[in-house]
């Protein structure tokens, strides 16, 4: 029998036992010699001769070779006996270790894998920090704008209405109502206000009047344009000087002061609370009996505070004595002392819905500016500060720029956007207070119809991985709002003491002043 392997199969005969002829033994010797180069069959014991003869008669042991025979290598043998082939076990040499080259290759591959993992981790971590910083920036920017716009909408607000009286015809033929303003009887009005930068007698502002007068326009609102050197007009001394140190005002940030009456406070007169009228029609006393659910306690009206008595047609500011144990207040005497009045306030009838306010606390003076604060990592950042009646509150951190533009209606009914300096020096004003003080300096501060507010927010934390494209930003106050590198802006972060490697975004809003409607 021949195998089907490649090449020629050579039959191999198995040696018979001793009882067989010599010719058979000669064939066994030949097979034994050939086994040196190939497979060497195992010679059976003499006791197994019968089984060996049966195997020899029924089958043949055939060695197959492929291609060129190689010395010293034993080929596979196929024992075809009708049962699965039995392969001769081959000896394996045990592994004794790795070579130096294999070790170095393994180390290099390990380093490559480790560096790839580190690179992916750093990239993911940097991207995550940037995304978190941007999310915080946007959230705080929206909150800052909401706080600013809420106060700006209330600017120049008074009780019930902000305008009144007979309409006046301008030079262009347009009819405009006069702006409403409280009449001042108190000698010491300025001490009841906060953040005043226009004291009596400083040019161009008039000296303090000796008789009753209407609240002047320059005490209604006040803006200040600031660059990297100074502010115009000059800031009040209650605002810190600009600089890079913690506690200073942020360099190049503007300031705005607005005033309005908090009409949610005060005491309604006409029921249990009333105005007692003297024979000459002036106020002799005011009796307060507060509603505990809706009105403040009488104790909140502190001695020495000024009173504001207002209805939907007029308002008066005057000094009072009290309140006493019975809840009564009476106008202070007429005189030249700071605690006196220049005249007697006129009583208001219950039908006109009068209301009494504590002028020192209810007439709000709100100033916004930026202050340098510690960012907590060795860096500094800017904080938006809301200063209400002298009490300061940090609104948000990360504000680096603050600017305002004012939409003003002039005497001809035309509206234009001006800076604080232009408004302060403007003279073509619409109808102002009923009786002006001289030339009515700063009259345009009562003619503001809208305010555009801009802030520049930063991520507060320095990110060295940000490239030059990412850190570039636009700011409308810097010449048209073109995207530029931090160093190319009018006021640079480096000038302010802030790092360049941060995300920055501009927020802006146009706020209509609800209390200006001539």
Image (cartoon, rainbow, N blue to C red):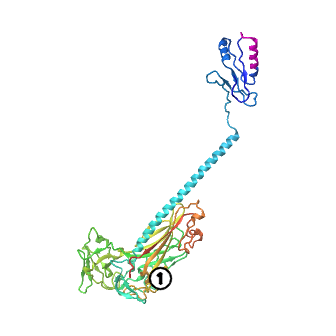
Residue 47, given in percent of the width and then of the height, sits at: 66, 11
Q: Residue at left 58%, top 52%?
A: 120
Residue 90, given in percent of the width and then of the height, sits at: 67, 27
Magenta span contains residue 249: no
Foreground: 386 or 285? 386
Q: Secondary structure at mark 1?
A: helix
Which residue is labeled 1 in the image?
Answer: 424
Q: Is residue 40 left or right of residue 208?
A: right
Q: Is residue 283 left or right of residue 6?
A: left
Name the quadrant containing residue 103. Answer: top right
Magenta span contains residue 25: yes
Q: Residue furthest top?
A: 19
Residue 89, given in percent of the width and then of the height, sits at: 66, 25
* Badge 1 density bin: few <14, some 14–19, many ≥20, Cα 10 Å: many
Q: Is residue 194 visible?
A: no
Magenta highlight range = 18-32
Above or below 356: residue 102: above
Q: Is residue 400 left or right of residue 209?
A: right
In which quadrant of the rendered image does the C terminus lie?
bottom left
């Amino acid at each position: 029998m021949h195998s089907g392997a490649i090449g020629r199969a050579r039959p191999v005969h198995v040696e018979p036992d001793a009882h067989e002829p010599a010719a058979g033994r000669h064939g066994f010797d030949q097979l034994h010699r050939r086994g040196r180069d190939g497979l060497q069959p195992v010679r059976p014991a003499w006791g197994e001769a019968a089984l060996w003869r049966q195997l020899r008669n029924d089958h043949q042991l055939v060695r197959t070779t492929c291609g060129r025979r190689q010395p010293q290598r034993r080929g596979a043998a196929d024992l075809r006996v009708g049962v699965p082939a039995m392969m001769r076990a081959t000896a394996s040499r045990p592994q004794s270790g790795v070579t130096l080259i294999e070790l170095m290759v393994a180390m290099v591959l390990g380093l490559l894998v480790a560096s790839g993992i580190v690179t992916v981790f750093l990239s993911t971590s940097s991207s995550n920090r940037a995304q978190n910083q941007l999310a915080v920036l946007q959230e705080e920017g929206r909150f800052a704008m909401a706080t600013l716009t809420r106060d700006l909408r209330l600017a120049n607000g008074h009780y019930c209405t902000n305008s009144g009286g007979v309409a006046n015809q301008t030079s262009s033929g347009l009819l405009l109502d006069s702006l409403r303003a409280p009449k001042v009887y108190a000698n010491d009005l300025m001490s009841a206000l906060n953040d005043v930068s226009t004291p009596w007698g400083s040019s161009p502002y008039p000296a303090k009047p000796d008789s009753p007068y209407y609240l002047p326009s320059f005490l209604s609102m006040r803006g200040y344009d600031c660059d990297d050197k100074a502010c115009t007009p000059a800031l009040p001394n209650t605002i810190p000087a600009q600089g890079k140190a913690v506690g200073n005002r942020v360099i190049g940030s503007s300031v705005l002061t607005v005033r309005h009456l908090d009409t949610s406070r005060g005491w309604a007169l006409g029921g249990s609370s009333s105005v007692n009228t003297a024979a000459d029609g002036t106020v002799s006393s005011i009796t307060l009996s507060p509603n505990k659910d809706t009105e403040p306690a009488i104790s909140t009206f502190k001695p020495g505070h000024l009173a504001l008595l207002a209805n939907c047609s007029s308002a008066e500011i005057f000094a009072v004595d009290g309140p006493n144990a019975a809840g009564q207040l009476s106008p202070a005497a007429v005189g030249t002392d700071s605690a006196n009045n220049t005249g007697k306030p006129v009583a208001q009838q219950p039908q006109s819905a009068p209301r009494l306010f504590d002028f020192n606390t209810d007439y709000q003076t709100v100033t916004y500016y930026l202050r340098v604060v510690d960012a907590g990592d060795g860096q500094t950042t800017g904080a938006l500060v809301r200063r209400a009646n002298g009490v300061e509150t940090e609104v948000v951190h990360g504000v680096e720029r603050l600017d305002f533009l004012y939409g003003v209606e002039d005497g001809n009914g035309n509206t234009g956007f001006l800076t604080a300096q232009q408004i302060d020096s403007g003279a073509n004003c619409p109808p102002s207070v009923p009786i002006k003080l001289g030339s009515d300096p700063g009259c345009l501060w009562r003619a503001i119809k809208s305010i555009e507010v801009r802030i520049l927010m930063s991520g507060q934390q320095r990110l060295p991985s940000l490239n030059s494209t990412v850190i570039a930003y636009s700011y409308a106050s810097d010449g048209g709002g073109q995207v530029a590198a931090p160093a190319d802006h009018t006021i640079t972060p480096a000038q302010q003491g802030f790092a360049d490697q941060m995300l920055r975004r501009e927020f802006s809003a146009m706020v209509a002043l609800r209390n200006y409607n001539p």
